[in-house]
Amino acid sequence: MNKVLLGAAVLLSVASTQVMAGPNWNQASISYLSADVGDNDDIDGLGLSGTKLLNSNFFLAGSYSSLTLETFNAFGYEADADLNFLSLGVGARKAVAGNTDIYGIVSYEKIDLSISTGFGGFYSAAVDDESGYGLRVGVRSMMTPKFEINGEISYIDVLDDAETGFGFGAAYYFTNQFSVGAGYNTADDIDTLNLTGTFNF
C-alpha cells in the first residue's frame, strides 16, 4: 500500500504548473493486452473501453476485456481458457490544476472464466461467472499539450474475493482526436501490459 500511495503522490507532484487544457473525458479506446495470470504463461487479448461526460463533473465509464490461453494437457489434447472482464460505472472528476484532474469511479464488475479441454475427440467446458463491485480513484495530468500521464488505485470485490491493484500509463496525442499510449496494471493475481489507441471526441 505504501508503494501505491507513493506512486500516486509522485504523479501528483510532477504535474506541470503551466496553464493548459486538462484531460479529455470523451474517449473510446481499443487495446492489445498481455497478461500474466498466477503461475500461468503470458496470455494476450483485446480490450475496449470508454468514458463519456454527463456534465462538467460526472461521467460514465465502461470497459470489456477478453484474454485467451491456448495450451495442451498431459495427454497432448488442446485446452483453452477464456477470461473475460466487464466493468460499467459512474465517475466524478475534479480539476485540481489547469492541466490535472482527480477522479473516482463506482462500478459493477463481472468476471467470466470458461475452460474447454479436448480428450478422446470430445470437448468438455467449465464456466464460472461471478459479479461484484469496484471502486477506483486516480489522477490524469496533461504534462504538455500532447503528453498525458495517469495513475490509479483500484479495489475490486467479486463474490467476497477482494483485490487491490494499481496502474499507471502515458499517452501521446498525435492530434486532438487521436492518441496512442501504454500502461501497466497489477493486482494480486494478474499483471497486465497494454498498448492502446484512443479516439477523442
Image (tube, grey):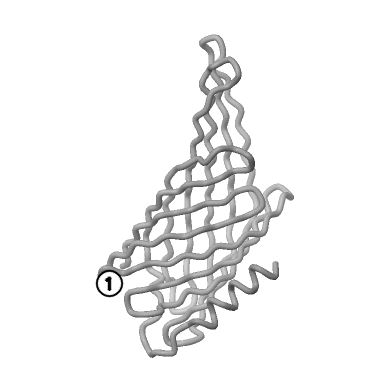
Residue visible at 59% across and 74% down in the picture? 8
| Quadrant hosting residue 155 | bottom right
Viewer-proximal residue among 24 and 99: 99
Viewer-proximal residue among 69 and 82: 69
Residue underneath mark 1: 176
Residue type indicated by callout 1: Asn
Residue visible at 53% across and 17% down in the picture? 77
163 up-or-down from 26: above or below: above
Residue visible at 52% across and 35% down in the picture? 82
Horizontal side of residue 105 vs 60, given as left or right: right
Q: Position of residue 157 (x, y in %)?
A: 68, 54
Q: Position of residue 95 (x, y in %)?
A: 48, 83
Residue visible at 59% across and 70% down in the picture? 137
| Quadrant hosting residue 197 | bottom left
- Looking at the image, the residue that sits furthest to the right is 160
Picture quarter with the N terminus: bottom right
The mark tally for this picture is 1
Q: Residues within 10 Å of mark 1 (few under 14, many from 20)?
A: few
Picture quarter with the C terminus: bottom left
Horizontal side of residue 8 vs 52, given as left or right: right
Q: Position of residue 60 (x, y in %)?
A: 47, 65
Horizontal side of residue 80 vs 22, given as left or right: right
- Looking at the image, the residue that sits furthest to the top is 120
Give SS at disc 1.
Answer: loop
25 up-or-down from 181: above or below: below
Q: Position of residue 118 (x, y in %)?
A: 54, 17
